[in-house]
Image (tube, helix red, strand yellow):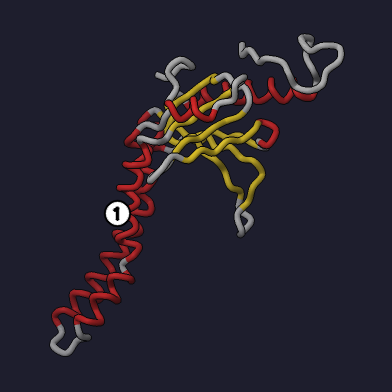
């Protein structure tokens, strides 16, 4: 359990001086790893089709293509198979570097494979927040919060930043929505703590 007093070090390095962390969490390992299963299934099916449909028959044929052609060709053609397995190892390594946070200024996502990457979204950029719990996540007592900042892919599909496989997803969803509404309201309608001459947002948010 993380608190403002025992934040992961990398969060301490990027927090603003007046920024308060309201919630920090991390994905549960097994359901986080399961996000790679759809790609793994495709990769295994691809590998099975290549092996049973082509490689085995070519190896048994007396006048088949030479090994100098077969080996490099299928090394490339089997990329979905190798890639799906490599992706599972990547998820194992990424998990230990993955944390999520809700602050009084933004939501933050820390992750990384070779190094540590951060993604932060200010509340005024967030256009939609959803919580999803698929059947496996429901069994394991976790869920995913999808945060949209209005970005779309080259094909026009919405892009989201996700808190994947977190515990108590509905509770965290409610907490995020509450903070988001409070902060946006305070920005648009200054509260009573602001001075009469208000140069900008300069109040401290105290979550209830």
- Residue 79 picture location, percent across and down: 33, 65
Residue 48, by quadrant, is bottom left
Name above or below for residue 116 compared with residue 47. above
Residue at figure coordinates x 50%, y 28% from the top left = 13
Mark 1 burial class by Cα count in 10 Å: few <14, some 14-19, many 20+: some
Q: Residue at x 62, y 22 (%)?
A: 104
- Residue drawn at 42 percent across, 25 percent down: 8
Residue at the limit of the structure toward the right, as seen here: 197
Could you say which quadrant of the image residue 195 lies in? top right
Does residue 107 sit above or below 195 in this rendering?
Answer: below
**What kind of element bears circle 1?**
helix
Q: Position of residue 28 (x, y in %)?
A: 37, 31
The residue indicated by pointer 1 is 85
Side of 168 relative to 152 (left or right): left
Residue found at x 86% / y 15%:
197
Q: Quadrant of residue 116?
A: top left
């Amino acid at each position: 359990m993380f608190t403002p007093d025992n934040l992961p070090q990398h969060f301490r390095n990027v927090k603003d001086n007046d920024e308060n962390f309201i919630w920090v969490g991390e994905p549960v390992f097994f359901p986080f790893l399961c996000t790679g299963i759809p790609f793994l299934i495709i990769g295994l099916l691809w590998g099975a089709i290549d092996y049973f449909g082509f490689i085995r028959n070519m190896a048994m044929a007396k006048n088949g293509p030479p090994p100098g052609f077969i080996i490099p060709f299928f090394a490339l053609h089997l990329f979905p198979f190798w890639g799906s397995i490599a992706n599972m190892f990547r998820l194992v390594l990424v998990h230990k570097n993955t944390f999520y946070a809700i602050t009084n200024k933004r939501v933050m996502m820390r992750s990384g494979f070779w190094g540590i990457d951060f993604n932060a979204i200010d509340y005024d950029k967030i256009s939609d927040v959803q919580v999803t719990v698929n059947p496996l996540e429901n069994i394991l007592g976790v869920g995913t919060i999808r945060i949209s900042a209005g970005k779309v892919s080259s094909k026009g599909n919405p892009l989201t930043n996700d808190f994947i496989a977190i515990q108590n997803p509905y509770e965290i969803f409610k907490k995020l929505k509450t903070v988001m509404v409070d902060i946006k309201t305070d920005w648009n309608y200054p509260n009573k703590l602001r001075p009469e001459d208000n140069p900008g947002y300069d109040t401290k948010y105290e979550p209830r």
